[in-house]
Image (cartoon, helix red, strand yellow):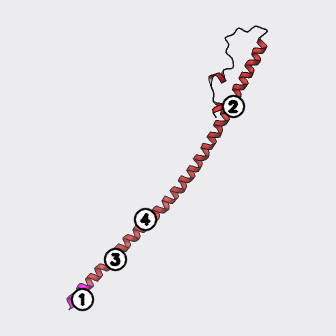
């Protein structure tokens, strides 16, 4: 886009400092029209380039939104699995503790019978 860079010189179509005689008016008007057309073309090219860039950014934003949605789904599934594992661990720990207590009580009961 460097060749499309807008500068004061490129955008100046009329300097207006010279007195224009009636004989030179058509030539000056033609010169002004050509400079104005060049400025308009340059502006149009810049606008089209900006539109392309905005469209590319919008596409990237949509891609990022989709990625973030997928990550959120994965995190939700991960949280559910983690909660399930924690619950299983808690239930297993309780079961192990009850079995340990039962074995200890059984051993104590067997020790008192002797």
> Which circle, 2 or 3, is nearer the viewer?
2
Reply above or below: 92 against 19: below
Q: Would residue 46 be found to the left or right of residue 73 on screen?
A: right
For the point 46% across and 65% down, which residue is it? 81
Instruction: Compare marks 3 and 1 and give the one earlier in the sequence.
Output: 3
Determine which residue is flagged by label 4.
83
Q: CA distance from mark 4 to mark 2?
A: 58 Å
Name the one closer to the observer, 68 or 105: 68
> Is residue 111 a member of the stretch shown in magenta?
yes
Number of dots carrying numbers: 4
Highlighted range, magenta:
106-113
The disc placed on residue 44 is 2
Query: Can you say whether 37 is above or below 75 in the image?
Result: above
Task: Tell me the number on the disc at residue 96.
Answer: 3
Identify the residue shown where x is 27% and y is 85%.
106
Name the residue nearer the viewer: 92 or 35. 35
CA–CA distance between discs 3 and 4?
Answer: 20 Å
Q: Residue 93 — which label?
A: none
Circle 3 — which element? helix
Q: Position of residue 68 (x, y in %)?
A: 53, 52
- Which element type, helix, strand or loop, lies under badge 4? helix
**Numbered circle sitting on residue 110:** 1
Task: Classify mark 2: helix, strand or loop.
Answer: helix
Is disc 1 surrounded by few (<14), some (14 to 19) or many (20+) residues within 10 Å? few
Residue 95: say if magenta. Answer: no
Q: Where does residue 97 sit, x and y in percent of width and height?
A: 31, 76
Residue drawn at (40%, 68%), measured in percent from left and top? Answer: 87
User: Label 1 near label 3: C-beta < 8 Å?
Assistant: no
Q: Residue furthest bottom?
A: 114
């Amino acid at each position: 886009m460097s060749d499309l860079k807008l500068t004061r010189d490129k955008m100046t179509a009329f300097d207006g400092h010279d007195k224009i005689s009636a004989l030179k008016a058509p030539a000056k008007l033609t010169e002004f029209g050509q400079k104005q057309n060049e400025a308009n073309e340059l502006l149009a090219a810049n606008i089209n380039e900006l539109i392309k860039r905005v469209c590319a950014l919008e596409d990237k934003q949509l891609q990022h939104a989709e990625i973030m949605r997928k990550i959120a789904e994965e995190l939700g599934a991960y949280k559910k699995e983690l909660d399930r594992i924690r619950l299983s661990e808690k239930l297993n720990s309780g079961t192990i503790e009850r079995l340990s207590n039962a074995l200890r009580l059984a051993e104590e009961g067997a020790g008192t019978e002797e």
